[in-house]
């Protein structure tokens, strides 16, 4: 991880567009470096996609979503309502360019390359968050629990062998577990789980909303500004953008940073760059635990591919990926169909659903984020497209963008994450 420079960079006026966890971390790191930063977003900080994830800072999550054999799932994506990866028919024409690149990214050689490149970012994911947690005395939200994946059959466990092999080859810790080890870690789970893997380097965010609030509070205390406004266009001088125009005002700046998640491409297009960005929609239900010890850490139930995460406000059930863009109405049928499986996995789980939620993971076809300088303007920077690892890489992304804006040397090659790679 780059060391913070003792040389104070020249202070710049910076507008960060997007108040999700990536935008908040980016704004906070920039403000720490002495820049004058405003974060602009029509929604409250951390209350869009950042709100509803499974809460894992997953340093070993380097394996892309598209893998060898994913192309065989396309019929199921279209016809099977219970498919883990679901594509709505009506969205197929618009999704086709992204989907073709997605399937190409699943070739064996590409999977290995993508995993190596993501590992360069992920290795410092927890330590990047720790910089902020320690600096601003943020306690009792992030726990060093690791996370667990469990399976009831050897056949299901073996399907994850390729991912575990890549993780191990890249230096991430993976502990293989049997029935007794699983029961010691999570006594509340049903006894049917005979195989599993434990990933001890991962951390657990027990309330993503509270973490966003804590980062936002630290940002404001340092002098940063959060504006509840929607950017509608940019104004330019002869060579670059100089002002963001919103529904409520006009804001001049030296630097613009796009961290708007699934809505980022609408902004980058205004700035001359069209990015092959789409969304992997994710759902969750919040449930109570009526009896038994519950869970201590996020746990993946391998056969059905859902996660149970013991958040501060209840047990969170997250499941599946839906490819349908940001405008289609939600479809909660699949995740409600997971409820019987969730209760079978965790017998103490209650029946009451206290929240149903839909979020929009901003995803690139190769599962790698866009991080770096705009190819069009030298005063525009991008930090979006993190897919399933937005929480994981939020602080690391903020560090890197701060280093770029502040003129520090990087110890990482960001070319694999450039916007124009497709």
Image (tube, helix red, strand yellow):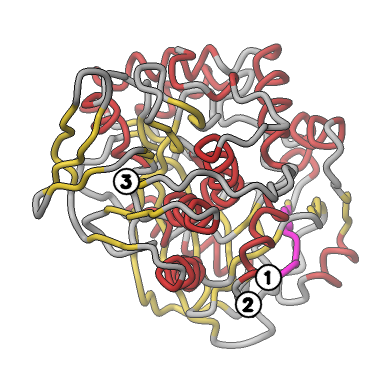
* Residue 310, above or below 57: below
Residue 403 x %, y %: 58, 40
On screen, residue 125 versus residue 66, left or right, reads right
The residue range painted magenta reads 143-150
Question: Which residue is pictured at 45% across the width and 27% down the height?
Answer: 364
Q: How far across and down, in percent of the image, does residue 29 sit?
A: 53, 54
- Seen in the picture, residue 288 relative to 377 is either above or below; the reply is below
Bin the neighbour count of mark 2 within 10 Å (Cα to Cα): few under 14, some 14-19, many 20 and up. few
**Is there CB contact under 8 Å for labels 2 and 1?**
yes
Q: In 3D space, how far apart are the residues under numbered discs 3 and 2 (Cα atoms)?
A: 26 Å
Q: Quadrant of the C terminus?
A: top left
Image coordinates for residue 279, horizontal then vertical, percent: 36, 36
Q: Nearer the viewer, residue 186 or 205?
A: 205
SS at circle 1:
helix
Q: Which residue is mark 1?
A: 134
**Residue picked out by circle 2:** 137
Along the horizontal axis of the image, is 344 left or right of 333?
A: right
SS assignment at label 3: strand
Q: Quadrant of the N terminus?
A: top right
Q: Quadrant of residue 272?
A: top left
Residue shown at 43%/28% (left/top)?
76
- Residue 157 lies, with reference to residue 80, above or below; the image says below
Please, is residue 167 above or below residue 351 in the view?
above
Q: Which residue is mark 3?
A: 17
- In the image, what residue occupies the spot 20% across and 41% down? 244
CA gap, disc 2 and disc 1: 5 Å
Residue 412 part of the magenta segment? no
Q: SS at mark 2? A: loop
Magenta part, dominant SS: strand
């Amino acid at each position: 991880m780059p060391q913070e420079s003792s040389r104070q960079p020249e202070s710049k006026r910076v507008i960060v567009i997007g108040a999700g966890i990536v935008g908040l971390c980016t704004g906070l790191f920039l403000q720490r470096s002495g820049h004058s930063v405003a974060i602009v977003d029509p929604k409250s900080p951390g209350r869009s996609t950042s709100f509803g994830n499974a809460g894992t800072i997953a340093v070993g999550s380097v394996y892309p979503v598209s893998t060898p054999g994913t192309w065989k799932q396309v019929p199921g994506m279209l016809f099977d309502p219970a498919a883990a990866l679901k594509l709505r028919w009506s969205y197929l024409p618009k999704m086709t360019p992204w989907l073709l690149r997605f399937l190409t990214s699943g070739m064996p050689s590409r999977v290995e390359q993508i995993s190596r490149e993501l590992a360069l970012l992920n290795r410092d994911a927890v330590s990047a968050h720790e910089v902020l947690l320690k600096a601003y005395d943020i306690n009792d939200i992030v726990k060093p629990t690791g996370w667990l994946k469990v399976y009831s059959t050897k056949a299901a466990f073996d399907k994850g062998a390729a991912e575990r092999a890549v993780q191990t080859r890249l230096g991430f810790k993976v502990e293989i577990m049997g029935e007794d080890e699983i029961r010691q870690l999570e006594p509340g789970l049903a006894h049917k789980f005979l195989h599993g893997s434990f990933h001890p380097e991962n951390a657990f965010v027990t309330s993503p909303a509270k973490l966003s609030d804590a980062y936002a509070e630290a940002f404001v205390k340092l002098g940063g500004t959060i504006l509840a406004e929607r950017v509608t266009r940019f104004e330019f001088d002869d060579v670059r953008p100089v002002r963001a125009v919103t529904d409520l005002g006009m804001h001049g700046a030296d630097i613009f940073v796009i961290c708007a998640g699934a809505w980022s491409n609408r902004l980058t297009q205004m700035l001359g760059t069209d990015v092959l960005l789409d969304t992997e929609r994710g759902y969750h239900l919040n449930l109570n635990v009526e009896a038994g010890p519950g869970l201590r850490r996020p746990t993946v139930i391998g056969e059905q591919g859902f996660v149970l995460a013991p958040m501060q406000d209840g047990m969170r059930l997250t499941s599946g990926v839906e490819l349908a863009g940001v405008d289609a109405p939600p479809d909660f049928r699949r995740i409600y169909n997971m409820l019987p499986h969730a209760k079978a996995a965790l017998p103490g789980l209650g029946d009451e659903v206290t929240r149903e939620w839909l979020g929009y993971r901003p995803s690139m076809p190769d599962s790698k984020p866009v991080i770096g300088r705009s190819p069009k303007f030298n005063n525009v920077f991008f930090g979006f497209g993190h897919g399933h690892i937005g929480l994981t890489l939020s602080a690391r992304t903020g560090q890197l963008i701060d280093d770029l804006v502040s003129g520090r040397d990087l110890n990482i090659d960001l070319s694999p994450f450039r916007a124009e790679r497709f």
